[in-house]
Image (cartoon, rainbow, N blue to C red):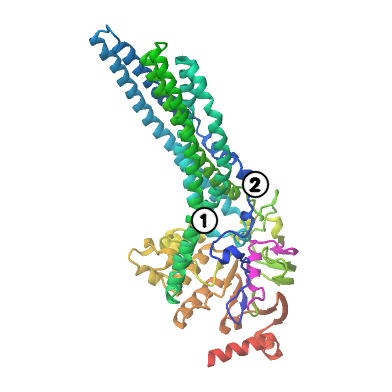
């Protein structure tokens, strides 16, 4: 005799409340409405979030050291070029100089160019390697943390927006590590080294050059604060576009089926225009900052060169010296000007890092205790709900179930029925400990779920959803998702028991056939049978069936129902079922309304009582016989 808990409803179950949409989300902006929507004001004003990137790069000290060596080589070689020109002018073109000696100074310049080329190649390789590696590590860390967070987190925060962070924000960080930081360090070295060389060449003119620096730093600071805020907003708008594209493309049949192409186009256009509007503000700020800095830098240098030309005419300095001064001052000015743009990129990278840090800083609410209690071996399959009250995090004012008590014996078939919103699916969520109740306790084989490791609890449960959820992979990987170590023989045995072997054999490559995005190459009934076979491979003592046949035609339902009978054999099975035939097969029926148990008993007994179950049954009989 097999066992099960059947949950019957008058329509599709809807016990998972969606997060309330705020005004921006209604407008299509896709901003998160939960914990990720809180912005840290301190991060908005500093580059501190880039510390996460620094720590990730510090894990590879060898590559960092080689990149720094290459940076030093390229900076030194670049600054050596003006010195080479000084030698060429002062010694190669000097009056009475040996013409054959001129080639020696040009060969010196060629040697510097060769060193510069080699150092640049080394810098590009090691810095680019670090950029790719750091981004890969950050993505892995974020994904690892996301996999540990309870489902409640994804009710409060949009998975599409999170996905956008994993792509667009990590791309910004890759740019920062692979390009921006390298450019910043190189230009900083050139600015410092060039300034020291200028002091050695002409101290008086260099002092005048240094007076320009405060005039450059002040606008950078003023513009930078505004730029940081606008850059963060710009990244949010880009993330909104990514989330919207994912949402629409994944529901393209619905969009086209309801002739909503024009509306979606207009909605997307509005999002793009909002993004462009924010980007324009960012561009204007950066353009203004660049213009002011360049005007101050090169205007000041022009005045200094004018003074230097007068000194040459007076004979106090040589022509080679003023040439070297002009070239070096140009390099220093260019380095400082580049640093202004680099600062803007660093601000954008810091914004991206802060958004990813928010994901890394999220702590899972469902965790194993320090000393988890072992579940009994062998497993029995008993499940107990004792005075359980639960509210979803997004709707704390409305309990999903209230003072719910249910004892499910090992090997028992129990049906829990009720209208939509009665709390049926919530029982499944709590049984797998995706949530913890606010009151009461849930026990598996006598052990409180909060005292056990959640992974151990879930190993003893197999779940078949209302619609077969498949991954973008081949049939083999979708089947063995229930038991990744399953042998070929076990996979085919589960497929045969689920009435899936026949259509799998007809696929172009059998088990190795790619099933498309979410299994789109299969029919609904075929996807459901794959899901049942996956649950069979799980070989768990407790089975959860969430209206597994409600969306199928008669032919598919018969095949799926036969597969379910194999799956339910000798297992404790909890089922949300829409069909009366499945409800009648239950050992016990529990009727729920508004999160409470209102009736329980056998089918004939409940039908004769004239209560809620009798009403639901009459509706179903009427629909089936109409």
Q: Is residue 373 above or below residue 337?
A: below
Q: Quadrant of the N terminus?
A: bottom right
Residue at the spot x=55%, y=37% of the render? 219
Residue at the spot x=62%, y=55% of the render? 37
Which of the 4 image quadrants contains residue 391?
bottom right
Q: Label 2: state its secondary structure.
A: helix
What segment is highlighted magenta in the picture? 420-446
User: x%, y% of residue 559?
Assistant: 46, 77
The answer to whether residue 29 is magenta is: no
Q: Is residue 268 above or below residue 126?
A: below
Q: Label 1: state its secondary structure.
A: helix
Q: Is residue 557 visible?
A: yes
Q: CA distance from mark 2 to mark 1?
A: 19 Å
Indicate left or right for 146 with 259 as reference: right
Which of the 4 image quadrants contains residue 606?
bottom right
Q: Between residues 322 and 274, which one lies in front from this camera angle?
A: 322
Of callouts 2 and 1, the N-terminal one: 2
Tell which residue pokes out farthest to the left in this image: 100
Task: Point out which mark residue 424 bears.
Answer: none
Residue receiving disc 2: 41
Which of the 4 image quadrants contains residue 546?
bottom right
Q: Crowding at label 1, few (<14), some or many (≥20) Cα neighbours within 10 Å?
A: many
Indicate left or right for 585 with 510 as reference: right
Q: Crowding at label 2, few (<14), some or many (≥20) Cα neighbours within 10 Å?
A: few
Residue at the spot x=65%, y=43% of the render? 42
Q: Between residues 395 and 141, which one lies in front from this camera angle?
A: 395
User: x%, y% of residue 230?
Assistant: 55, 49
User: x%, y% of residue 5?
Assistant: 63, 74
User: x%, y% of residue 133?
Assistant: 46, 40
Residue receiving disc 1: 237
């Amino acid at each position: 005799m097999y066992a099960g808990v059947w949950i019957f409803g008058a329509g599709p179950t809807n016990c998972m409340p969606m997060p309330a949409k705020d005004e921006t989300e209604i407008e299509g902006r896709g901003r998160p409405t939960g914990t990720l929507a809180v912005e840290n004001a301190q991060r908005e004003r500093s580059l501190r979030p880039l510390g996460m990137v620094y720590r990730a790069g510090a894990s590879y000290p060898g590559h960092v050291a080689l990149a720094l060596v290459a940076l030093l080589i390229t900076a030194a070689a670049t600054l050596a070029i003006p010195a080479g020109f000084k030698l060429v002018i002062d010694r190669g073109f000097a009056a009475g100089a040996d013409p054959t000696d001129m080639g020696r100074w040009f060969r010196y310049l060629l040697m510097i160019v060769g060193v510069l080329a080699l150092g640049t190649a080394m810098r590009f390789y090691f810095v680019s390697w670090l950029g790719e590696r750091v981004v890969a590590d950050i993505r892995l860390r974020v994904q690892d943390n996301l996999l540990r967070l309870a489902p409640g987190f994804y009710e409060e925060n949009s998975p599409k927006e999170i996905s956008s962070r994993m792509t667009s924000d990590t791309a910004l960080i890759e740019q920062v590590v692979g390009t921006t930081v390298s450019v910043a360090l190189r230009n900083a070295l050139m600015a410092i080294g060039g300034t020291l060389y200028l002091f050695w060449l002409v101290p008086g003119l260099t002092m005048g050059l240094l007076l320009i620096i405060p005039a450059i730093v002040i606008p950078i600071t003023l513009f930078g604060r505004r730029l940081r805020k606008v850059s963060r907003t710009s990244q949010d708008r880009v993330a909104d576009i990514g989330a919207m594209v994912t949402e629409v493309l994944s529901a393209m049949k619905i969009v086209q089926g309801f002739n909503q192409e024009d509306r979606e186009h207009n909605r997307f256009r509005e999002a793009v225009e909002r993004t462009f509007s924010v980007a324009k503000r960012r561009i204007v700020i950066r353009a203004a900052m660049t213009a002011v800095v360049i005007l101050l830098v090169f205007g000041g240098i022009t005045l200094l060169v004018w003074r230097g030309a007068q000194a040459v005419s007076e004979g106090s300095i040589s022509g080679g010296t003023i040439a070297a001064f002009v070239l070096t001052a140009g390099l220093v000015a260019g380095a400082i000007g580049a640093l202004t743009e680099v600062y803007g990129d660093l601000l954008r990278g810091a914004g991206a890092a802060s958004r990813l840090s928010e994901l890394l800083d999220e702590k899972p609410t469902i965790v194993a205790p320090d000393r988890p209690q072992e579940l009994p071996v062998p497993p029995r399959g008993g499940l107990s709900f004792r005075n359980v009250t639960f509210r979803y995090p997004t709707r704390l004012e409305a309990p999903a179930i209230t003072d719910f008590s249910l004892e499910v014996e090992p090997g028992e078939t129990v049906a829990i029925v009720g209208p939509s919103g009665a709390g049926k699916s919530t029982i499944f969520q709590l049984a797998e400990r995706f949530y913890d109740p606010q009151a009461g306790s849930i026990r598996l084989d006598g052990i409180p779920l909060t005292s056990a490791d959640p992974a151990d609890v879930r190993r003893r449960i197999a779940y078949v959803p209302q619609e077969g959820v498949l991954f973008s992979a081949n049939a083999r990987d979708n089947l063995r998702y229930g038991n990744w170590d399953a042998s070929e023989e076990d996979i085919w045995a589960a497929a045969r028991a689920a009435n899936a072997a026949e259509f799998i054999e007809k696929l172009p490559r059998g088990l190795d056939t790619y099933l498309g995005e979410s299994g789109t190459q299969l029919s609904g009934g075929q996807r459901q049978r794959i899901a049942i076979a996956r649950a069979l491979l799980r070989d768990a003592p407790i089975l959860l069936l969430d209206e597994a046949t409600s969306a199928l035609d008669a032919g598919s339902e018969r095949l799926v129902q036969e597969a379910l009978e194999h799956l339910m054999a000798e297992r404790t099975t909890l089922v949300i079922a829409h069909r009366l035939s499945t409800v009648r097969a239950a050992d016990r029926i529990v009727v729920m309304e508004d999160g409470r148990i209102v009736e329980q008993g056998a089918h004939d007994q409940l039908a004769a009582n004239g209560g809620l179950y009798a009403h639901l049954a009459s509706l179903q009989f009427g629909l089936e016989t109409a």
